[in-house]
Amino acid sequence: MKKIVFYCLASAGSLLLLTRGGGLSAGGGFLSNGIRPAVSVPADNPQTDAKIRLGKQLYFDKRLSADNTISCATCHAPGTGWANHGATDTGIKGQVGGRNSGSIIDSAYMKSQFWDGRAATLEAQAVGPIANPIEMGETLENVVLKLNAIPGYKAQFRDVFGTDASADAIGKAIAAFERTIISGPSPYDRYLRGETGAMPASAVRGLAVFNGKGHCSACHSGPSFSDGGFHNLGVGFEKGGFKDEGRYKMTAAAKDLGAFKTPGLRNTAQTYPYLHDGSEKTLEAVIDFYDRGGVPNGNLDRLMVPLHLTVKEKADLLSFLNSLTGPVPEIKEPELPN
Ligand code: HEC
Ligand code: HEC
């Protein structure tokens, strides 16, 4: 407990320093990245073992795509940090999308889903890729028909939801499964709980850079390391504009042009490549990107300024980011109903 109080103070201190020294204010301040609360579960979709088992089958089932070749796990595979190591993803018929697949690890903690926040809940998110023409390219109506024609699925949907398969039930079951893909205590969590040796000394120094000179926690705040907000870092900006307008597509507000959701950083070492377009291959490269102050453009977040980190500070920051990786439940591909 003592330690957490100390971090809150340390973070508040760095806010003051920055505000005085660099004229930066994080608007809302630097929140500490304390211990995570339990995942919150919507009242209309309680977790049950049978529902989670059904959601897991659906997650791995290629029959959810138009040509039966792509499942959720194709792009968010357990073996690759529940993400995909391609810069952007390849869906049905080899079509390539424009964005990097976020990891679903800890997505249960995010305030919104997708890089532009276009889905409010995991339930709403889960049915998106099925109907996305370049991801799974299927219609929801047809998926529902296909699943109800598989006796093993029909029986399970009846058992779990008291109805046949429906778009609503598919979304709920997959979301319930995703809420179990949470990373366990990382070296950082163990350190917070008082195990002082759990993080190497370099990571402890890196934590200070994260909250202080690097002011990373201005945006990567809270126990999941995301403020849930949208920021313009200049990623994907080229002469003439942004390849992807980001949050602007949802709000049409000028301030949102080129702004993307702050991703959480838990298990980030496993989910390369990075940024919404997968343009940086390593965490070292991401740190260098921040050190340069991002990519200048008319809408750059005011917190994006050159950091002048030393070689040692960069290495310490990397060590800290690596300490955010905790164990994830080991999931084997389930047997699918026929
Ligand atoms: C063809 C590859 C592909 C398939 C198939 C796919 N996804 Fe994704 N997923 C992506 C990409 C790319 C993104 C980011 C897209 C965006 O933000 O616009 C994403 C984003 C997400 C996110 C949000 C992550 C975040 O941090 O915001 C979740 C959750 C997710 N997918 C779950 C699923 C589920 C569940 C399925 C199956 C029903 C699925 N995905 C199928 C590629 C895929
Ligand atoms: C102004 C808010 C802000 C600040 C400050 C900030 N980040 Fe980020 N971070 C973001 C956003 C937004 C993205 C995604 C941007 C995109 O892809 O367009 C991101 C992406 C990342 C990623 C890639 C994660 C992934 O899954 O692709 C890492 C790693 C990261 N930040 C670490 C840091 C570190 C380390 C610092 C401090 C040196 C930092 N961030 C400071 C908002 C911020």
Image (cartoon, grey):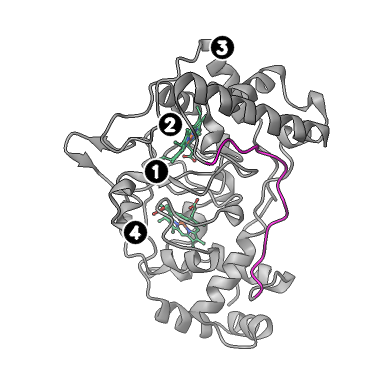
Residue 139 at x, y percent in the picture = 37, 75
What amino acid does circle 2 point to? Answer: Leu
The disc label shown at residue 256, or none: none
Mark 2 or 3, which is nearer the eye? Answer: 2
Q: Is residue 334 above or below residue 295?
A: below
The x, y position of residue 30, in whole percent, is: 58, 35
Q: Which residue is mark 1?
A: 276
Q: Which residue is mark 4?
A: 250
What residue is drawn where x is 37% and y is 71%? 138
Q: Which residue is mark 3?
A: 312
Whether 41 is among the magenta residues is: yes
Using the image, determine if residue 191 lies above or below residue 94. Answer: above
| CA gap, disc 3 and disc 1 | 27 Å
Of residues 40 and 254, the one nearer the viewer is 254
In the rendered structure, which segment of residues is drawn in magenta?
Answer: 28-43
Q: Is residue 193 magenta?
A: no
Whole-number angstrom distance, CA of label 4 to CA of label 3: 40 Å
Q: Is residue 68 visible?
A: no
Disc 2 from disc 3: Cα separation: 22 Å
Please tell me the numbered disc located at residue 303: 2
Give the structural element (helix, strand or loop) at label 2. loop
Task: Determine contact: label 2, label 1, CB under 8 Å.
Answer: no
Amino acid at pointer 4: Met
Is the CB of the residue bearing disc 2 within 8 angstroms of ligand 2? yes
* Residue furthest to the left: 240
Indicate the position of residue 177 as horizontal and vertical percent values. 63, 63
